[in-house]
Amino acid sequence: MKFRLFGKRRKKEDLRLADEELDGGQERADGDGVPELSKEKVVLEKISVDLNNKMLRLDYIKRLYEGIREAKRQNGDIKAEYGQVTSYLKDIQLIDQALPEEKKELMEAAQAIVELTRERENLKRRKYKFNDAQKAAMERFEPKVAKDVANMKEYEDYQIKIKHDMRQLDSEKRILLSEKRDIIRRQGTLRLVSKALSGILAMFGLLILTIFFVFQVNIQVPFLATAAFAFVVLLVIVIESRKNRTDMVITERKCNRAIALANRTKIKYVNNTRTIDYLCSKYKVRNATELEFVYDQYRKAKREWAKEREDAFLLNEKNEILIRELDALGVKDKNIWSHQADALVEPKEMVEVRHSLNERRQKLREQIDYNNGIMQDFLGELERIRQKSPEYAQEIEEVLQEQ
Protein backbone atom coordinates (compact mmCIF):
# COMPACT_ATOMS: atom_id res chain seq x y z
CA MET A 1 0.00 0.00 0.00
CA LYS A 2 1.50 3.38 -1.00
CA PHE A 3 0.58 6.93 0.11
CA ARG A 4 1.69 10.32 -1.07
CA LEU A 5 2.60 13.20 1.19
CA PHE A 6 -0.14 15.64 0.22
CA GLY A 7 -2.96 13.22 -0.57
CA LYS A 8 -4.51 12.93 -4.00
CA ARG A 9 -3.73 15.39 -6.77
CA ARG A 10 -5.63 15.93 -9.93
CA LYS A 11 -4.31 13.95 -12.82
CA LYS A 12 -4.29 17.05 -15.00
CA GLU A 13 -1.96 18.78 -12.53
CA ASP A 14 0.31 15.73 -12.44
CA LEU A 15 0.43 15.64 -16.22
CA ARG A 16 1.21 19.34 -16.37
CA LEU A 17 4.12 18.94 -13.95
CA ALA A 18 5.40 15.94 -15.86
CA ASP A 19 5.23 17.88 -19.13
CA GLU A 20 7.15 20.78 -17.59
CA GLU A 21 9.90 18.40 -16.47
CA LEU A 22 10.10 16.81 -19.92
CA ASP A 23 10.15 20.21 -21.65
CA GLY A 24 13.02 21.37 -19.45
CA GLY A 25 10.84 23.51 -17.20
CA GLN A 26 13.22 23.06 -14.27
CA GLU A 27 14.16 25.58 -11.62
CA ARG A 28 16.93 27.95 -12.60
CA ALA A 29 20.25 27.35 -10.94
CA ASP A 30 22.25 30.05 -9.24
CA GLY A 31 26.00 30.44 -9.39
CA ASP A 32 26.54 27.56 -6.95
CA GLY A 33 24.49 25.10 -9.00
CA VAL A 34 21.62 25.17 -6.46
CA PRO A 35 18.15 25.43 -8.03
CA GLU A 36 16.61 28.89 -7.66
CA LEU A 37 13.12 28.39 -6.23
CA SER A 38 10.18 30.71 -6.74
CA LYS A 39 9.49 32.84 -3.69
CA GLU A 40 5.72 32.85 -4.25
CA LYS A 41 5.04 29.14 -4.76
CA VAL A 42 7.35 26.46 -3.46
CA VAL A 43 5.80 23.03 -4.07
CA LEU A 44 7.35 20.17 -2.13
CA GLU A 45 8.05 17.05 -4.09
CA LYS A 46 5.75 14.10 -3.58
CA ILE A 47 6.89 11.07 -1.63
CA SER A 48 5.60 7.56 -2.17
CA VAL A 49 6.01 5.21 0.80
CA ASP A 50 5.15 1.52 1.10
CA LEU A 51 3.36 1.49 4.48
CA ASN A 52 3.42 -2.28 4.57
CA ASN A 53 7.18 -2.09 5.11
CA LYS A 54 7.61 -1.34 8.83
CA MET A 55 11.10 0.12 8.51
CA LEU A 56 10.05 2.49 5.73
CA ARG A 57 6.85 3.33 7.59
CA LEU A 58 8.62 4.21 10.83
CA ASP A 59 11.22 6.27 8.96
CA TYR A 60 8.42 8.09 7.14
CA ILE A 61 6.58 8.85 10.42
CA LYS A 62 9.81 10.19 12.00
CA ARG A 63 10.43 12.44 9.03
CA LEU A 64 6.89 13.79 9.26
CA TYR A 65 7.41 14.63 12.94
CA GLU A 66 10.78 16.23 12.16
CA GLY A 67 9.11 18.35 9.49
CA ILE A 68 6.39 19.43 11.92
CA ARG A 69 8.97 20.28 14.60
CA GLU A 70 11.12 22.25 12.15
CA ALA A 71 8.08 24.18 10.94
CA LYS A 72 7.17 24.99 14.58
CA ARG A 73 10.72 26.14 15.30
CA GLN A 74 10.74 28.32 12.21
CA ASN A 75 7.39 29.80 13.17
CA GLY A 76 8.65 30.51 16.68
CA ASP A 77 11.55 32.58 15.32
CA ILE A 78 9.36 34.26 12.72
CA LYS A 79 6.66 35.16 15.25
CA ALA A 80 9.28 36.74 17.52
CA GLU A 81 10.46 38.88 14.60
CA TYR A 82 6.83 39.54 13.63
CA GLY A 83 6.13 40.77 17.15
CA GLN A 84 9.19 43.04 16.98
CA VAL A 85 8.06 44.56 13.68
CA THR A 86 4.55 45.03 15.05
CA SER A 87 6.06 46.74 18.09
CA TYR A 88 7.93 49.13 15.77
CA LEU A 89 4.69 49.99 13.98
CA LYS A 90 2.91 50.62 17.29
CA ASP A 91 5.77 52.92 18.31
CA ILE A 92 5.33 54.88 15.09
CA GLN A 93 1.61 55.14 15.79
CA LEU A 94 2.34 56.50 19.29
CA ILE A 95 4.71 59.09 17.85
CA ASP A 96 2.25 60.14 15.15
CA GLN A 97 -0.62 60.46 17.62
CA ALA A 98 1.34 62.55 20.13
CA LEU A 99 0.35 66.20 20.44
CA PRO A 100 2.67 68.85 18.92
CA GLU A 101 3.56 70.26 22.36
CA GLU A 102 4.43 66.74 23.53
CA LYS A 103 6.75 66.23 20.55
CA LYS A 104 8.39 69.68 20.54
CA GLU A 105 11.54 68.75 22.48
CA LEU A 106 11.63 65.36 20.77
CA MET A 107 11.64 66.97 17.31
CA GLU A 108 14.30 69.49 18.33
CA ALA A 109 16.54 66.68 19.57
CA ALA A 110 15.88 64.63 16.41
CA GLN A 111 16.69 67.62 14.18
CA ALA A 112 19.93 68.21 16.08
CA ILE A 113 20.86 64.52 15.75
CA VAL A 114 20.26 64.63 11.99
CA GLU A 115 22.44 67.73 11.59
CA LEU A 116 25.20 66.46 13.87
CA THR A 117 25.24 63.05 12.16
CA ARG A 118 25.44 64.67 8.74
CA GLU A 119 28.29 66.90 9.90
CA ARG A 120 30.17 63.95 11.38
CA GLU A 121 29.81 62.02 8.14
CA ASN A 122 31.17 64.97 6.20
CA LEU A 123 34.14 65.23 8.54
CA LYS A 124 34.85 61.51 8.23
CA ARG A 125 34.90 61.78 4.44
CA ARG A 126 37.33 64.71 4.57
CA LYS A 127 40.73 63.92 3.09
CA TYR A 128 43.76 65.62 4.59
CA LYS A 129 46.79 66.28 2.42
CA PHE A 130 49.43 64.82 4.71
CA ASN A 131 50.56 61.28 5.32
CA ASP A 132 50.79 59.31 8.55
CA ALA A 133 54.50 60.02 9.00
CA GLN A 134 53.95 63.77 8.63
CA LYS A 135 51.02 63.62 11.04
CA ALA A 136 53.14 61.80 13.62
CA ALA A 137 55.90 64.42 13.25
CA MET A 138 53.39 67.24 13.68
CA GLU A 139 51.99 65.67 16.83
CA ARG A 140 55.45 65.03 18.26
CA PHE A 141 56.99 68.44 17.55
CA GLU A 142 53.83 70.55 17.56
CA PRO A 143 55.15 73.25 19.95
CA LYS A 144 58.20 73.80 17.69
CA VAL A 145 56.65 73.54 14.25
CA ALA A 146 55.73 77.21 13.81
CA LYS A 147 59.25 78.29 14.81
CA ASP A 148 60.83 75.64 12.56
CA VAL A 149 58.72 76.83 9.62
CA ALA A 150 60.06 80.38 10.07
CA ASN A 151 63.62 79.10 10.59
CA MET A 152 63.46 76.86 7.54
CA LYS A 153 62.30 79.78 5.40
CA GLU A 154 65.26 81.82 6.68
CA TYR A 155 67.63 78.96 6.01
CA GLU A 156 66.36 78.59 2.44
CA ASP A 157 66.60 82.37 1.84
CA TYR A 158 70.10 82.32 3.30
CA GLN A 159 70.89 79.35 1.05
CA ILE A 160 70.08 81.50 -1.97
CA LYS A 161 72.35 84.29 -0.69
CA ILE A 162 75.17 81.83 0.00
CA LYS A 163 74.93 80.42 -3.51
CA HIS A 164 75.00 83.96 -4.90
CA ASP A 165 78.10 84.78 -2.82
CA MET A 166 79.78 81.56 -3.93
CA ARG A 167 79.18 82.44 -7.57
CA GLN A 168 80.56 85.94 -7.04
CA LEU A 169 83.62 84.70 -5.19
CA ASP A 170 84.23 82.05 -7.80
CA SER A 171 83.99 84.71 -10.53
CA GLU A 172 86.33 87.02 -8.59
CA LYS A 173 88.81 84.19 -8.07
CA ARG A 174 88.82 83.40 -11.78
CA ILE A 175 89.47 87.11 -12.57
CA LEU A 176 92.36 87.27 -10.09
CA LEU A 177 93.89 84.10 -11.46
CA SER A 178 93.64 85.59 -14.93
CA GLU A 179 95.40 88.76 -13.68
CA LYS A 180 98.17 86.62 -12.15
CA ARG A 181 98.69 84.91 -15.48
CA ASP A 182 98.87 88.36 -17.19
CA ILE A 183 101.44 89.62 -14.68
CA ILE A 184 103.57 86.51 -15.15
CA ARG A 185 103.28 86.90 -18.89
CA ARG A 186 104.31 90.62 -18.73
CA GLN A 187 107.25 89.80 -16.48
CA GLY A 188 108.41 87.14 -18.90
CA THR A 189 108.10 89.57 -21.79
CA LEU A 190 110.08 92.17 -19.81
CA ARG A 191 112.88 89.68 -19.24
CA LEU A 192 113.10 88.90 -22.94
CA VAL A 193 113.14 92.61 -23.81
CA SER A 194 115.85 93.33 -21.23
CA LYS A 195 118.00 90.52 -22.54
CA ALA A 196 117.56 91.60 -26.13
CA LEU A 197 118.38 95.24 -25.34
CA SER A 198 121.38 94.18 -23.25
CA GLY A 199 122.72 92.23 -26.22
CA ILE A 200 122.11 95.15 -28.60
CA LEU A 201 123.80 97.65 -26.25
CA ALA A 202 126.79 95.33 -25.79
CA MET A 203 127.22 95.00 -29.55
CA PHE A 204 126.81 98.77 -30.00
CA GLY A 205 129.46 99.44 -27.30
CA LEU A 206 131.82 96.98 -28.91
CA LEU A 207 131.30 98.69 -32.26
CA ILE A 208 132.10 102.14 -30.79
CA LEU A 209 135.27 100.82 -29.16
CA THR A 210 136.39 99.21 -32.43
CA ILE A 211 135.87 102.49 -34.31
CA PHE A 212 137.81 104.36 -31.64
CA PHE A 213 140.79 102.06 -31.75
CA VAL A 214 140.87 101.63 -35.51
CA PHE A 215 140.01 105.11 -36.73
CA GLN A 216 141.08 107.14 -33.67
CA VAL A 217 137.75 108.95 -33.73
CA ASN A 218 136.34 110.81 -30.76
CA ILE A 219 133.61 108.54 -29.33
CA GLN A 220 132.72 110.53 -26.25
CA VAL A 221 129.33 111.73 -27.53
CA PRO A 222 128.17 108.32 -28.91
CA PHE A 223 129.39 106.64 -25.76
CA LEU A 224 127.57 109.04 -23.50
CA ALA A 225 124.41 108.75 -25.66
CA THR A 226 124.60 104.97 -25.52
CA ALA A 227 125.18 105.00 -21.79
CA ALA A 228 122.24 107.37 -21.31
CA PHE A 229 119.98 105.21 -23.47
CA ALA A 230 121.12 102.11 -21.58
CA PHE A 231 120.40 103.85 -18.29
CA VAL A 232 116.91 104.90 -19.40
CA VAL A 233 116.13 101.43 -20.66
CA LEU A 234 117.41 99.88 -17.46
CA LEU A 235 115.37 102.32 -15.40
CA VAL A 236 112.17 101.50 -17.34
CA ILE A 237 112.83 97.80 -16.98
CA VAL A 238 113.44 98.11 -13.24
CA ILE A 239 110.28 100.23 -12.76
CA GLU A 240 108.12 97.81 -14.76
CA SER A 241 109.64 94.84 -12.99
CA ARG A 242 108.93 96.38 -9.59
CA LYS A 243 105.41 97.26 -10.66
CA ASN A 244 104.83 93.67 -11.77
CA ARG A 245 106.11 92.35 -8.47
CA THR A 246 103.90 94.77 -6.56
CA ASP A 247 100.89 93.81 -8.68
CA MET A 248 101.70 90.14 -8.15
CA VAL A 249 101.81 90.59 -4.36
CA ILE A 250 98.51 92.52 -4.36
CA THR A 251 96.88 89.98 -6.67
CA GLU A 252 98.13 87.10 -4.55
CA ARG A 253 96.67 88.72 -1.47
CA LYS A 254 93.37 89.32 -3.22
CA CYS A 255 93.33 85.77 -4.52
CA ASN A 256 94.09 84.34 -1.08
CA ARG A 257 91.37 86.51 0.43
CA ALA A 258 88.90 85.32 -2.22
CA ILE A 259 89.86 81.69 -1.58
CA ALA A 260 89.49 82.18 2.19
CA LEU A 261 86.08 83.80 1.73
CA ALA A 262 85.06 81.02 -0.65
CA ASN A 263 86.11 78.40 1.91
CA ARG A 264 84.15 80.15 4.65
CA THR A 265 81.14 80.40 2.36
CA LYS A 266 81.42 76.72 1.49
CA ILE A 267 81.44 75.85 5.19
CA LYS A 268 78.33 77.97 5.69
CA TYR A 269 76.74 76.34 2.66
CA VAL A 270 77.44 72.82 3.95
CA ASN A 271 76.14 73.60 7.46
CA ASN A 272 73.08 75.41 6.14
CA THR A 273 72.33 72.58 3.67
CA ARG A 274 72.63 69.97 6.40
CA THR A 275 70.36 71.99 8.68
CA ILE A 276 67.71 72.17 5.95
CA ASP A 277 68.10 68.45 5.25
CA TYR A 278 67.71 67.71 8.96
CA LEU A 279 64.49 69.72 9.19
CA CYS A 280 63.16 68.05 6.04
CA SER A 281 63.93 64.64 7.53
CA LYS A 282 62.47 65.68 10.87
CA TYR A 283 59.09 66.64 9.39
CA LYS A 284 59.15 64.27 6.36
CA VAL A 285 58.92 67.11 3.84
CA ARG A 286 60.95 68.37 0.89
CA ASN A 287 61.16 72.10 1.59
CA ALA A 288 59.79 74.95 3.70
CA THR A 289 56.82 75.46 1.39
CA GLU A 290 55.67 71.89 1.90
CA LEU A 291 56.30 72.12 5.65
CA GLU A 292 54.16 75.24 5.87
CA PHE A 293 51.40 73.59 3.80
CA VAL A 294 51.43 70.39 5.90
CA TYR A 295 51.39 72.43 9.12
CA ASP A 296 48.42 74.44 7.85
CA GLN A 297 46.59 71.22 6.88
CA TYR A 298 47.38 69.71 10.28
CA ARG A 299 46.01 72.74 12.15
CA LYS A 300 42.85 72.63 10.06
CA ALA A 301 42.50 68.88 10.68
CA LYS A 302 43.08 69.40 14.39
CA ARG A 303 40.27 71.94 14.55
CA GLU A 304 38.00 69.52 12.69
CA TRP A 305 38.97 66.66 15.03
CA ALA A 306 38.10 68.87 17.98
CA LYS A 307 34.79 69.71 16.30
CA GLU A 308 34.17 66.00 15.73
CA ARG A 309 34.76 65.26 19.43
CA GLU A 310 32.46 68.12 20.39
CA ASP A 311 29.81 66.81 17.97
CA ALA A 312 30.12 63.34 19.49
CA PHE A 313 29.50 64.79 22.94
CA LEU A 314 26.51 66.81 21.72
CA LEU A 315 25.20 63.81 19.78
CA ASN A 316 25.29 61.68 22.91
CA GLU A 317 23.49 64.42 24.83
CA LYS A 318 20.78 64.76 22.16
CA ASN A 319 20.36 60.97 22.02
CA GLU A 320 19.69 60.93 25.76
CA ILE A 321 17.06 63.64 25.33
CA LEU A 322 15.52 61.72 22.41
CA ILE A 323 15.30 58.49 24.39
CA ARG A 324 13.85 60.32 27.37
CA GLU A 325 11.14 61.96 25.27
CA LEU A 326 10.31 58.70 23.48
CA ASP A 327 10.04 56.98 26.82
CA ALA A 328 7.62 59.68 27.94
CA LEU A 329 5.45 58.89 24.90
CA GLY A 330 5.41 55.19 25.79
CA VAL A 331 7.64 54.05 22.92
CA LYS A 332 9.10 50.59 23.60
CA ASP A 333 12.02 50.37 21.15
CA LYS A 334 13.62 53.73 21.78
CA ASN A 335 17.26 53.13 20.80
CA ILE A 336 16.57 52.43 17.11
CA TRP A 337 15.32 56.01 16.61
CA SER A 338 18.80 57.37 17.29
CA HIS A 339 19.85 55.77 13.99
CA GLN A 340 16.80 56.91 12.04
CA ALA A 341 16.15 60.31 13.54
CA ASP A 342 15.60 61.70 10.04
CA ALA A 343 12.29 59.78 9.95
CA LEU A 344 11.11 61.81 12.95
CA VAL A 345 11.70 65.16 11.23
CA GLU A 346 10.93 64.18 7.62
CA PRO A 347 7.39 62.88 6.98
CA LYS A 348 8.50 61.22 3.73
CA GLU A 349 11.17 59.25 5.58
CA MET A 350 8.62 58.13 8.16
CA VAL A 351 6.33 56.95 5.36
CA GLU A 352 9.24 54.94 3.93
CA VAL A 353 9.97 53.39 7.35
CA ARG A 354 6.32 52.47 7.85
CA HIS A 355 6.10 51.04 4.34
CA SER A 356 9.24 48.97 4.88
CA LEU A 357 7.91 47.61 8.18
CA ASN A 358 4.57 46.69 6.59
CA GLU A 359 6.41 44.86 3.81
CA ARG A 360 8.50 42.98 6.36
CA ARG A 361 5.43 42.06 8.37
CA GLN A 362 3.63 40.84 5.24
CA LYS A 363 6.56 38.63 4.29
CA LEU A 364 6.74 37.24 7.83
CA ARG A 365 3.01 36.53 7.77
CA GLU A 366 3.44 34.66 4.49
CA GLN A 367 6.21 32.59 6.06
CA ILE A 368 4.01 31.77 9.04
CA ASP A 369 1.12 30.79 6.76
CA TYR A 370 3.46 28.66 4.68
CA ASN A 371 4.83 26.82 7.72
CA ASN A 372 1.29 26.39 9.09
CA GLY A 373 0.30 24.84 5.77
CA ILE A 374 3.25 22.46 5.97
CA MET A 375 2.28 21.43 9.50
CA GLN A 376 -1.34 20.91 8.47
CA ASP A 377 -0.29 18.73 5.54
CA PHE A 378 2.08 16.69 7.72
CA LEU A 379 -0.49 16.34 10.52
CA GLY A 380 -3.12 15.33 7.99
CA GLU A 381 -0.78 12.70 6.59
CA LEU A 382 -0.11 11.38 10.10
CA GLU A 383 -3.84 11.27 10.80
CA ARG A 384 -4.46 9.30 7.61
CA ILE A 385 -1.73 6.83 8.60
CA ARG A 386 -3.19 6.62 12.12
CA GLN A 387 -6.64 5.73 10.72
CA LYS A 388 -5.28 2.92 8.55
CA SER A 389 -4.47 0.57 11.39
CA PRO A 390 -4.32 0.51 15.22
CA GLU A 391 -0.76 -0.76 14.82
CA TYR A 392 0.12 2.35 12.83
CA ALA A 393 -1.56 4.53 15.47
CA GLN A 394 0.46 2.83 18.21
CA GLU A 395 3.70 3.37 16.29
CA ILE A 396 2.85 7.03 15.83
CA GLU A 397 2.32 7.39 19.58
CA GLU A 398 5.64 5.65 20.30
CA VAL A 399 7.48 7.91 17.87
CA LEU A 400 5.79 10.93 19.44
CA GLN A 401 6.95 9.86 22.91
CA GLU A 402 10.50 9.34 21.64
CA GLN A 403 10.52 12.81 20.10
Image: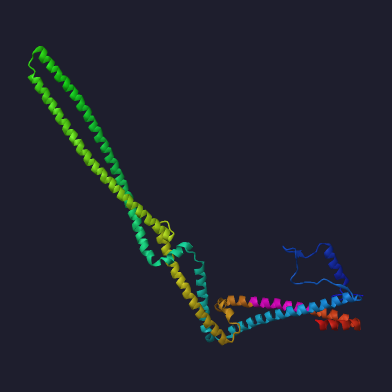
Vertically, is 216 above or below 180? above
Give how far across and how far down residue 357 sits, in percent.
65, 77
The furthest residue to the top: 215
Is residue 186 inside the magenta stretch?
no
Give how far across and how far down residue 4 sits, in percent.
87, 74
Task: Decide whether the magenta segment is chiefly helix, strand or loop.
Answer: helix
Give how far across and how far down residue 247 sits, in percent.
21, 38
Residue 245 makes an appearance in the image: yes
The furthest residue to the front: 213
Q: Is residue 181 left or right of residue 276?
A: left
Give how far across and how far down residue 391 sits, in percent.
90, 82
Residue situated in front as seen by the camera: 354 or 72: 72
Q: How is the image coloured?
A: rainbow
For image coordinates 79% across by 64% down, the residue present is: 26
Residue situated in front as seen by the camera: 45 or 282: 282
For image coordinates 85% across by 83% down, the residue present is: 398
Residue situated in front as seen by the camera: 158 or 45: 158
Residue 289 makes an appearance in the image: no
Is residue 369 inside the magenta stretch?
yes
Q: Quadrant of the C terminus?
A: bottom right
For image coordinates 59% across by 87% down, the residue present is: 330
Quadrant in the picture for residue 148: bottom left
Q: Which residues are magenta?
A: 355-374
Q: Quadrant of the N terminus?
A: bottom right
Q: Is residue 38 left or right of residue 261?
A: right
Quadrant in the picture for residue 61: bottom right
Vertically, is 256 above or below 367? above
Q: Is residue 170 left or right of residue 65?
A: left
